[in-house]
Amino acid sequence: MVAVAAGRVRLSDRRTERSWAVDLAPYRIGAVAVTQEQYLSVTGLRPSSVEGDRSPVEGVSWFDAVGFCNALSERAGLAPAYRVDGSAVEWDVSADGYRLPTEAEWEYACRAGTSGPRYGELDEIAWYRGNSGGRVHEVGGKVPNAWGLYDMLGNTWDWCWDVYDAEVYGEYRVLRGGGWSDQHWSCRASVRRRSHPTFRIDDVGFRVARSG
């Protein structure tokens, strides 16, 4: 995992035309998305549509990602970050276990000190519709950002902790980063997408984070 120092990031939403600043405490985030091999070793499951140990796990819901984080925490002897009661999930912010990044943490890590739409030339840093050949690729195959994070854009979307817009979309959660089937305009640091927490598809995965 990559350690990220405290900082501030400004998020924006094109649909509502609003922006807001978020102050961040130090945290750690996975250098790559959770792979199929890692997911299998923790859960005993291989949900992905195309098998490949070093490919990112996909076809996982937000609830699946939460369950993986808690299982990984327990295996590592850490306090699980989430209290789960049916479909209700609460984040214990005092826990030291694995969790999903917030979307502010995700964007701050993606940008790695840059201010443009991307941290590099798209074909060099991301698998997207223009170069993916219509399929997911192994993690770490493109150039990382300045902080050593791979595939922050392209390959698979990342589930984040946050509710997208509770008043309009209810429990829909935030997705970030763009995927292998997306056009170039979806693979930008600021792009926000939403989906129901039970949704599973072949271009959505996740990476883990930890507080502190």
Image (cartoon, grey):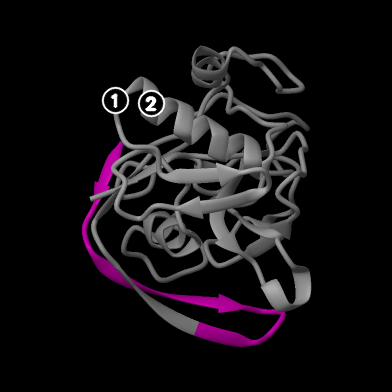
Placement of 192 over or under 175, stated as above or below: below
| Quadrant position of the N terminus in the picture | top left
Element at badge 1? loop
Say which amino acid is labelled 1: Gly
Q: Residue at x 55, y 40 (%)?
A: 66
Q: Is residue 121 magenta?
A: no
Q: Amino acid at mark 2?
A: Glu
- Residue at the outermost front position: 85
Pointer 2 local density, CA inside 10 Å: few below 14, some 14–19, many at least 20: some
Q: Is residue 97 above or below residue 177?
A: above
* Contact between labelled residues 1 and 2, with CB atoms less than 8 Å apart: yes
Residue 42: x percent and y percent? 50, 18
> Is residue 73 at least partly visible in the picture?
yes
Magenta segment, principal secondary structure? strand
**What whole-number distance in Å separates the C-alpha atoms at marks 2 and 1?**
5 Å
**Observer-nearest of 146 and 1:** 1
Nearer the observer, 91 or 183: 91
Question: To which residue does mark 2 refer?
Answer: 74
Q: In this figure, which residue is indicated by the disc labeled 1?
A: 77
Q: Is residue 18 magenta?
A: yes
Span of residues in magenta: 1-19
Q: Residue 129: x percent and y percent? A: 74, 43
Between 42 and 153, the one lying in front of the other is 42
Q: Is residue 6 left or right of residue 106?
A: left
